[in-house]
Image (tube, rainbow, N blue to C red):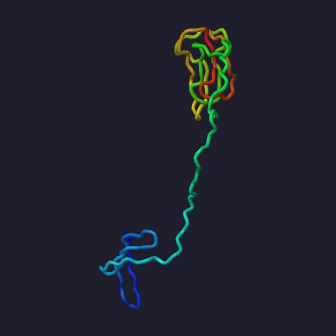
Amino acid sequence: MQKFKFTIDGTAYNVDVKVIKGGIAEIEVNGTPYVVEIDQEQKASKTPILVRGDAQTKPGENKITAKAAPVPPSNRPSANTIKSPLPGSITKIITKVGDTVKPGDVLLIMESMKMENNILAEKNGVIKKISVDAGQAVLQDDILMELE
């Protein structure tokens, strides 16, 4: 509710605007209620209205026709892979191929969201392969190292 004070030809009016819907307003002038029509141009909404038709599909259009080929064993990640826990860039590689590691050993350091994160060994093993270089950007779940 909005309150206004008008002076017309020296007479003071206290106007309370109760509700405005479309071009009609409910107001109260010096305690007397009125329903008035607002004579002004209506503003168009700046938000576009999205109109979509129903999606039309042809029979059999969404069927999978070919089976995906299985991933060869040489490309399958093993249970001994160390993956990137989040996207970032490798700042320093602490270990090298052939090093023996135990749980809690720092393998490499990566920077993500302006913070340095230590990537630790989760189990005993020997570094079999290092798949990244210092300065390289990695995505989440990229393979960083493999253990034997």
Q: Position of residue 120 (x, y in %)?
A: 55, 18
Number of disc labels: 0
Image point (38%, 80%), residue name? 5
In the figure, residue 33 lies in which quadrant? bottom left
Question: Residue lying furthest bottom in this view?
Answer: 9
Q: For the N terminus, give its image quadrant.
A: bottom left
Image point (61%, 11%), residue name? 147
Q: Position of residue 7 (x, y in %)?
A: 40, 85
As drawn, is 13 to the left or to the right of 49? left
Q: For the C terminus, give its image quadrant.
A: top right
Question: Residue lying furthest left in this view?
Answer: 31
In the figure, residue 28 lies in which quadrant? bottom left
As drawn, is 30 to the left or to the right of 73? left
* Up-down relation of residue 5 to residue 138 (above or below): below
Question: In the depicted view, which residue is nearer to us: 129 or 48?
Answer: 48
As drawn, is 133 to the left or to the right of 30? right
Question: In the depicted view, which residue is nearer to us: 108 or 71?
Answer: 71
Q: Position of residue 66 (x, y in %)?
A: 67, 24
Image point (65%, 28%), residue name? 138
Question: In the depicted view, which residue is nearer to us: 71 or 55?
Answer: 55
In the figure, residue 146 lies in which quadrant? top right
Question: Residue lying furthest front in this view?
Answer: 59
* Up-down relation of residue 36 to residue 62 (above or below): below
As drawn, is 52 to the left or to the right of 32? right
Image point (70%, 22%), residue name? 133
Q: Position of residue 2 (x, y in %)?
A: 38, 71
